[in-house]
């Protein structure tokens, strides 16, 4: 699924994604892929959903991660 990062706190190591399906999905830093350690609000991402949480999160090409 694709969506947009609504918020991310580097201190708390967690954030929230608004999915294209209209739902919101929390995530933790460990779900970021490709060696990302942080991501900024507004980044367009591709992700999977497991148990209501975003996992395997990839920032899409052309979107700024930082």
Image (spheres, rainbow, N blue to C red):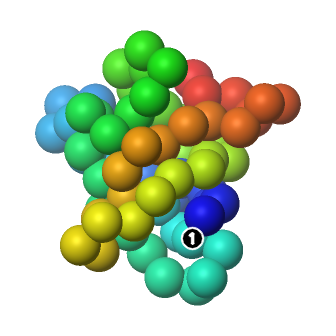
Q: Is residue 58 left or right of residue 15?
A: right
Task: Looking at the picture, tell me which residue is in the foreground, 59 or 38.
Answer: 59
- Percent position of residue 43, x then y: 64, 43
Q: Is residue 28 visible?
A: yes
Please give the name of the residue rendered at 36% of the width and 20% of the height, measured from the top-left corner. Answer: 37
Residue 63, percent from left and from top: 75, 34
Which quadrant would the C terminus be assigned to in this image?
A: top right
Whether residue 19 is situated above or below residue 12 in the rendered picture: below
16 on left or right of 27: right
- Label 1: element kind: strand
Residue at image coords 43%, 52%: 7
| Residue occupied by mark 1 | 19
Indicate left or right for 38 with 4 as reference: left
Give whichever of 52, 38 is nearer the camera: 52
Up-down relation of residue 46 to residue 26 (above or below):
above
Q: How many marks?
A: 1
Residue 4 drawn at (x, y percent): 61, 57
**Which image quarter: residue 25?**
bottom left
Could you tell me if residue 9 is visible in this image? no
Residue at the extreme left: 12
Quadrant assignment, res 3: bottom right
Q: Residues within 10 Å of mark 1 (few under 14, many from 20)?
A: many
* The N terminus, quarter of image: bottom right
- Report the residue that reaches farthest toward the right: 62
In this view, the residue farthest toward the bottom is: 22
Query: Residue at coordinates 62% horizontally, 36% vertically from top-left?
Result: 59
- Extreme residue toward the top, this view: 35
Residue at (40% x, 33% y) in the render: 32
Residue 66 in the image: above or below residue 44: above
């Amino acid at each position: 699924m694709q969506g947009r990062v609504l918020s991310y706190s580097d201190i708390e190591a967690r954030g929230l994604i608004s999915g294209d399906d209209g739902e919101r999905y929390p995530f933790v830093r460990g779900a970021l892929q490709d060696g990302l350690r942080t991501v900024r609000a507004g980044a367009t991402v591709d992700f999977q959903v497991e148990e209501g949480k975003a996992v395997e999160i990839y920032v899409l090409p052309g979107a700024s991660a930082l």
